[in-house]
Image (tube, rainbow, N blue to C red):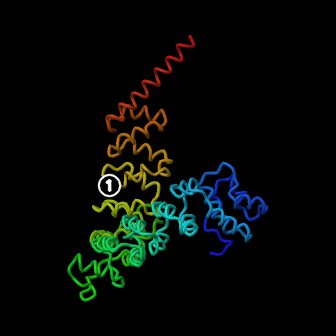
Amino acid sequence: MSESECPLPPETLPKPLLKHADPKAPVPLRMMGAKGLVPAVAPVDLVTLLFTLSFDPEQQVRDTARKTAEGLPEKIFSVALRSEGAHGPVLDWLSERFSQNESALELILLNASTPDETVARLAAGVPQRLTELIRQNELRLLRHDPIIRQLCQNPNAQASVIDGACDFCVRNGLLLLDVPQLVEAYKRVHGIDPTATPPLPGDTAESLMAEFRQELVDDEGNPQARQETEEEEKKKLTLTQRIIKMSVSEKIKLATLGNKEARTQLLRDSNKLVCMAAATSPRMTDGEVLALANSRTVNADVLRFIYSNRDFLKTYQIKMALVKNPKVPLPTALKLLQTLQERDIKELSRDRNVPQTVQSQAKAFMMKKEAASKGTAGDKH
């Protein structure tokens, strides 16, 4: 990327900060932002501003923004790096600024918004303790091959960590014949030398998407319902059967890259990593999340991911669905209940299809509300 091309659109920043990031704004105003002197700014917004200014037309502004980022106190950067609202490109940029700061790198590795490419780059050289952290993120290992490739080359990683990661990958169908540690893991797990007797090739996410491109990739469809031909129905059935037979690692890649139809099928997979890969896909829509929040059969880990995500909870219908869903832990459901509108709480107090405790709490809320109203009316007389 050139210095003048920031990958984030201007509207990524809160409006009050735009004047400090606008290339047309006076240099002193931009320098004020680059020095981190903007008052009352959230840590995550501050690092986003510094990242944006690192693409400023003025060399002095760019250098100052980078220097400020590298000198941020831990109480600022730790909050920013933990934030759900942190953007992938910003986290990648900060991983370079904090390349020697182990505590900062740990937070970057733990943030779900960190790009897989960033994790792969870090995997090649992070300290021993952080290699264990990378090993523990099983979904990333199976989703992005370069991570295990780079981890295997890290001189700081213990043999037990690399062996454990490779054994896990092999058991879930990931084999890279040009990675010696994975070849050795295959021998340990299956008792066969894969270089002498290559395993039969199965369907991969890439090959399946190439063959069924319209079904798997194109989320844009004609809203008008139409009758599927017998040939199309047969093809769809074949696709479903082939997805079921795929290895876990390829299912995860398909869940990440495929369309709604693929995700819907993979969300029902018996492997929780596959379910989570579908749920955390960047292609997931609010409509799909709402359907999951309403589902009584959704994987518990997927449901936890939804009710723990602040961005999802900004959608009122999703909150309502979670309160009604008996699979949501009661403490969580009751906490969300308190954020609903009075008319919806009233409806819940009469709804026998919701968990009894939720209905009872809704009734108690309405009784308290009515008693308070009567008390106010009595005071007026």
Residue 143: give x, y in percent of width and height: 39, 70
Left or right? Give the position of 164 relative to 40: left
User: Quick check: 86 above or below 241?
Assistant: above
Q: In the figure, is residue 99 to the left or right of 352?
A: right
Q: Residue at left 37%, top 74%? A: 205
Q: Is residue 62 above or below residue 202?
A: above
Q: Nearer the viewer, residue 68 or 330?
A: 68
Would residue 59 appear left or right of 162 to someone viewing this image? right
Residue 244 appears in the rendering: yes
User: Residue sitting at 65 percent across and 75 percent down?
Assistant: 2
Residue 192's image quarter? bottom left
Q: Residue 195: which quarter of the image? A: bottom left
Q: Secondary structure at mark 1?
A: loop
Q: Is 107 in front, or is 42?
A: 107
- Label 1, on which residue? 299
Q: Position of residue 59 (x, y in %)?
A: 73, 71
- Of residue 293 and residue 180, the one placed in the foreground of this image is 180
Tell me the kind of residue under disc 1.
Asn
Residue count near mark 1 (Cα–Cα under 10 Å), binned few <14, some 14–19, many ≥20: some
Q: Quadrant of the C terminus?
A: top right
Outermost residue, left side: 191
Q: Position of residue 369 (x, y in %)?
A: 47, 25
Q: Indicate the quadrant containing the N terminus: top left, top right, bottom left or bottom right.
A: bottom right
